[in-house]
Image (tube, rainbow, N blue to C red):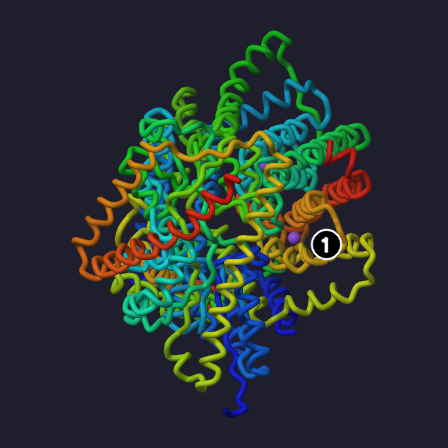
Amino acid sequence: ADGKVYRWKLAETWGPNFPVFGDATKNMAKMVEEMSDGRLIIRVDSSNKHKSPLGVFDFVKTGQYQMGHSGSYYWKGKNFNTLFFTTVPFGMTAPEQYAWFYHGGGMELMKKVYDQYGILSFPGGNTGNQMGGWFKKEINSVDDLKGLKMRIPGFAGEVLAKLGAKPTNIPSGELYTALERNTIDALEWVGPSLDLRMGFHKIAPYYYTGWHEPAAELQFMVNEKAYNKLPKDLQKILTVAMKTAAYDMYTQSYHESAQNLATLEQDYPNVKMRSFPEPVMKALKATNKALLKEFAAKDPMTAEILKSLSEYQAKARAWTNLSDRAYLDTSDKN
Amino acid sequence: MNFSLKVIGKIIDALGNLCSLLMILMILNVFYDVIMRYFFNDVSIGMQELEWHLFAAMFMFGIAYTLKEDAHVRVDILYDAMSKRKQAFINIFGALVFALPITLLIGYYSIDYTMDAYTMGEGSGDPGGLPHRWIVRSVIPLSSVFLMLAIIHVVLSQIQVLTTASAKEGAQ
Amino acid sequence: MTGIVLFAIALVCLFLGYSVAFTFAGVSLIVGALTLGVDLFEFMPYRIMSIMENTILMAVPMFIFMGIVLQKTGLAERLLESAAKLFGGMPGGVAVSTIIVGALLAASTGVVGASVVAMGVISLPVMLKNNYHQPTATGVICASGTLGQIIPPSIILIILGDVMGVPVGDLFRAAIIPGMLLIVAYTGYILILGQIKPEFCPPITVTESKRELLVQALKDIVPPLVLILTVLGSIFSGIATPTESSAIGAVGAVVLSIFYGSFSVSKMHEVSKDTVKVTSMVFAVLIGATAFSMVFSYSGSEYLIEEFFMELPGEKWTFIILSMLAILILGFFIDFIEIAFLVVPILLPVAIALDINLVWFAILISMNLQTSFLTPPFGFSLFYLKGVAPKSLKTTTIYKGVIPFILMQIAVLLLVVLFPEQLIFT
Ligand code: NA
Ligand code: NA
């Protein structure tokens, strides 16, 4: 390997000191620098610096930044198929999805979608199962969803809209106020790991379990041309560091969620944890399935990805049921 | 020169009227959205997005109109005490050295930025959101074109100030 | 270093008197292209797009529109005059009613630019007409208009909550008493000024009888007050977000003008054109500032500042005093968004390490940032007011006028520094 020092920049969607998500990029950059003995140095620019949280895709595509850290589903407006590399409603859990990425053809499909933009995409850390959101009123039936004004962006919003809910755009800085004053009736954010700092637990009494983002995977993006200019060993160091940082973020998310859930239960006993009743889940699931089918009919690539996802999910879920589910069901009873 | 000054002035005045219209439409758009949500419990993300599309075009195009109307804020401690001639020099200098290069550069870089959204067929990622993101992005290169016209207008009119001033001096 | 050189050059060039927006942008381009390369400006379309999509900023033109409607149709003048009359022939009456109306706007907007502009458009002509001391008149407006920074709902508190990871609701609650203290301080100052220097804020001659006054007051004050309460109420009741309530305010103002028989299409055309001009002026400055902050930040200048703070002796009070001073001084030059996004993240790890209560720290920062809106030469309130003031009014007059209010703000800030238990965590 030559002794040349490569200086790269990474643009992340998150603001400075954003917990968990921001730790993943810092962690990755630190590992790369240490493993390469200072031959590859990556400077991380948060959104306060580049001022364009959702410009990250374009930044990496045009090479203004060699790398990016974001969420693949943010690019749904550019290419619908990017949606599937973050998470899908009623899709796989994090271990299942990681198995799909690394062993079930996920990485290959992601490459196929991103190739046309000259971008290499890699898993960038998982939040684990996200919560269904903070609700001011209890949801007892599908009818309760009708006219429900909820901040829920992207595909999950489309599913809810089909059931009569009203997805609403609110800038994140105004979310708290909007929920407090009933401008919206509900919102989804992430989970205990990140929700507590927003203060929603003080104004919305119902915290529902999830359905729409069972394993949100963030994303590292690398400009392909820049990547190809790196010596082989640095390429390897970079991919290993990204993979490790993604895994680290997953464990950190798990930890933060556990920690914050304990705080929530102890300090705010009034918050009621709920799951959507069976008819609601059924309706959501059916709508989700119908919508995906609609999209699959429009684009062969979508169909190919969905086929891969659902086949792998069936296979992985059988094992999850026999292992984790059975274990939880049996061991917790005693 | 008089003729081109007049034509450009007319174009930018028309632009000012367009901005006024966009302004009114934006207010009505936002107002309509509130009424629909509050009284009819109806929300359309497309209409919500239209709000900032109107807003963006209004203030971006308005920058050129504001320049022609000489309504951009100045630190006028020294400026106010200067002669018309000196002020005209500063305005020509500022237009050519400060305003023109950044306008050209933003205009240049925003073409690719807009084309990118066009070739990708980029639209809103939210349910019911507006398609064709390139339209709102094209506000940036368009506003650069308008701003260039306004800069030409300022330079020409300030040259006129200089020549009439020296003509007066010559006559004396 | 580049950032500091850029500062110095921009500062000198501003005094040439060319437009602030283009001077910021132009100097940043020259310095940026020479030091960092012209490619850096490839980011400009992205940054401009972020401003274009910012629906919170969308409230600015609509509150400006509302203000100009109230002015052009004479409604604001009548409101303030009636309000001032109601305070009797007392010296400083108009100024006091400006503070009260300013506080009301603050409680409805949270957008400083919009309230300063609305106040400037509404009450400056009234005070000038009544022979007010010009610096005092402009100072009252800038200061009252800036109340929106601290009185909830406040954009800066929301941004700080996000940056610092503190629940926004906690910040809103914590800001109430400091905000009230400012209102009391301003009002007290004007009342005292009215006693010592009555010629600075002359009383209005009230010729009408008590009865006439009351009828007039009902006629003039109640409807516009209803309008302001509608704006406020629409936010607090949850009918609308602040941005939406600005549209309600704009439509409401037009409806009122119809009600008062002072509506005409040509007037509306004029109002709209004026609004476009003021709005575009403000956003051009914002775009210029963004070019500036881009060069400042990408040249690594904020790392110099970070290093300085990391080498401080580790005492809590040293840190608080120095960081407050730093923000105050930086506030002279850059605006609150840059400070909230560039400086606060640098201070945050130090604050956490020193076990400083973040809610308290956030309130201190936001009050300090409020002061930065008023501090020359780059106080955004000053620019906003200048944008709507008559051409004859000098920038230096405004600079002079805000000084007493800056001092009062520092005094209230010190109170909050010294008595957090009593003033914040009640
Ligand atoms: Na406020
Ligand atoms: Na300042």
Viewed as shown, does residue C49 lie left or right of B1?
right
Q: Nearer the viewer, residue C373 or A3?
A: A3
Vertical arrangement, residue B135 with respect to residue A174, above or below: below
Residue farthest along the front direction in this orientation: A334
The quarter of the picture where the C terminus of chain C appears is top right
Residue farthest along the top direction in this orientation: C211
Is there any visible trace of residue B157 in the rendered image?
no
Q: Position of residue B160 (x, y in %)?
A: 41, 64
Viewed as shown, does residue B10 lie left or right of A6?
left
Q: Is mark 1 within 8 Å of ligand 2?
A: no
Is there any visible trace of residue A165 in the rendered image?
yes
Crowd band around label 1 with a 10 angstrom C-alpha radius: few (<14), some (14–19), many (20+): some
Q: Nearer the viewer, residue A334 or A220?
A: A334
Question: Number of marks in the image?
Answer: 1
Q: Position of residue A101 (x, y in %)?
A: 36, 64
Give the residue type at disc 1: Ala
Viewed as shown, does residue C396 lie left or right of A32?
right
Q: Nearer the viewer, residue B17 or B110?
A: B110
Vertical arrangement, residue B171 with respect to residue A89, above or below: below
Chain under callout 1: C
Residue B122 sits in quarter: bottom left
Q: Position of residue C413 (x, y in %)?
A: 75, 43
Residue farthest along the bottom direction in this orientation: A2
The quarter of the picture where the N terminus of chain C appears is bottom right
Vertical arrangement, residue C227 with respect to residue C14, above or below: above
Q: Tag 1's secondary structure?
A: helix
Q: Position of residue A250 (x, y in %)?
A: 50, 58
Vertical arrangement, residue C140 with respect to residue C17, above or below: above
Ligand 1 lies in quarter: top right
Q: Nearer the viewer, residue B21 or B158?
A: B21
Q: Residue at x 41, y 57 (%)?
A: C49
Q: Which residue is mark 1?
A: C351
